[in-house]
Amino acid sequence: MNKNRMNFLTHHKCASTWLGSLVARICELNGLSCYHSHHGTAVPSREHDLSLLTNSDYATVSAQLHAPSFHIIRNPLSIISSAYFSHLSTHPTDGWVALEKQRRILNSQDRVTGMLLTLSFLESAEFYPSTPGPLHALHGWNFDDERIVTLRMESIVADVGAFLDAIRDRAGMEGLLLPSPDEFGFEKFAGRRVGEVNDASHYRSGDADGWRRELPPAIVDYVWAHFSTLMERYYPEAKLA
């Protein structure tokens, strides 16, 4: 019997930790089971109510979607900026040999070089064992697949209530209990206001436009050249003035 009722598909540095906490809370409130994997080889589980795949690969999951699915994305420019600071010092490296090597390199380079090396790392096909990097996965995603509703991370964290309503609407589960949006605001998770930077925190800033101050123009040009379809469709405002 297929228990799978909803899938959450996302990528590294696309609020995956935040989303995991939210999905876990929904399961707690409703007595639901959840399958969670950060491997690119993972597919939604038919034995669990909810599936959360935090390094989703479209070619892998597309033939295994048996329930309504949300795809959470983030501005690639923000992914690069956030990943640089995270990979430099705060992200755990347990079992992630490639990140251990990357961290040593980043700490030996200036910031601009480090940002460029981060871009390369995020585009790699073998970012984590059998798992593509988030930019590699986004580049290969079919955003026209009508089975999957794509939402911007920036939008859902700014209006958690609307995201929870969307989950209820698509879940098709009568009486689904949802947490208060206040439980999942940035201030609650980070302990400070949006835009207040803490380089030692996993939730460093929360500022969706922080990349404008941090990325070299060459990276912005590169992203617009190689991710133009995604950028024009979901982030048209993210052009340098």
Image: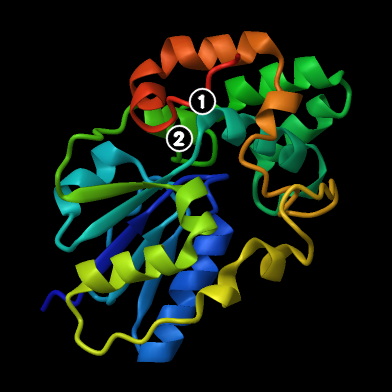
Answer left or right for 118 relative to 52.
right
Circle 1/circle 2 CB separation < 8 Å = yes
Q: Quadrant of the C terminus?
A: top right
Give the quadrant of residue 80: top right
Q: Position of residue 230 (x, y in %)?
A: 36, 26
Query: To which residue does mark 2 refer?
Result: 132
Relative vertical location of residue 34 with respect to residue 215 in this rendering, above or below: below
Question: Which element carries disc 2, helix, strand or loop?
Answer: loop
Dot 2 amino acid type: Pro
In the rendered picture of this protein, how many numbered marks are placed on residues? 2
Q: Position of residue 199 (x, y in %)?
A: 84, 46
In the image as oriented, which residue stretches furthest toward the left? 1
* Label 1, label 2: how far apart the Cα atoms are: 6 Å
Q: Nearer the viewer, residue 162 or 90?
A: 162
Relative vertical location of residue 182 with respect to residue 217 in this rendering, above or below: below
Dot 1 amino acid type: Ser
Answer left or right for 227 relative to 5.
right
Residue at 79% x, 37% y: name it.
88
Residue at 64% x, 35% y: name it.
209
Q: Position of residue 182 (x, y in %)?
A: 58, 75
Choose the circle earlier in sequence order: 1 or 2: 1
Q: Position of residue 34 (x, y in %)?
A: 37, 75
Using the rendered image of the protein, determine whether residue 140 is visible from the camera's viewpoint: yes
Query: To which residue does mark 1 refer?
Result: 124
Q: Quadrant of the N terminus?
A: bottom left
Q: Nearer the viewer, residue 79 or 56?
A: 79
Using the rendered image of the protein, determine whether residue 4 is visible from the camera's viewpoint: no
Callout 1: few (<14), some (14-19), or many (20+) C-alpha neighbours within 10 Å? some
Q: Nearer the viewer, residue 215 or 107?
A: 215
Question: Which element carries disc 1, helix, strand or loop?
Answer: loop
Question: Which color scheme did the rendering employ for the protein?
Answer: rainbow
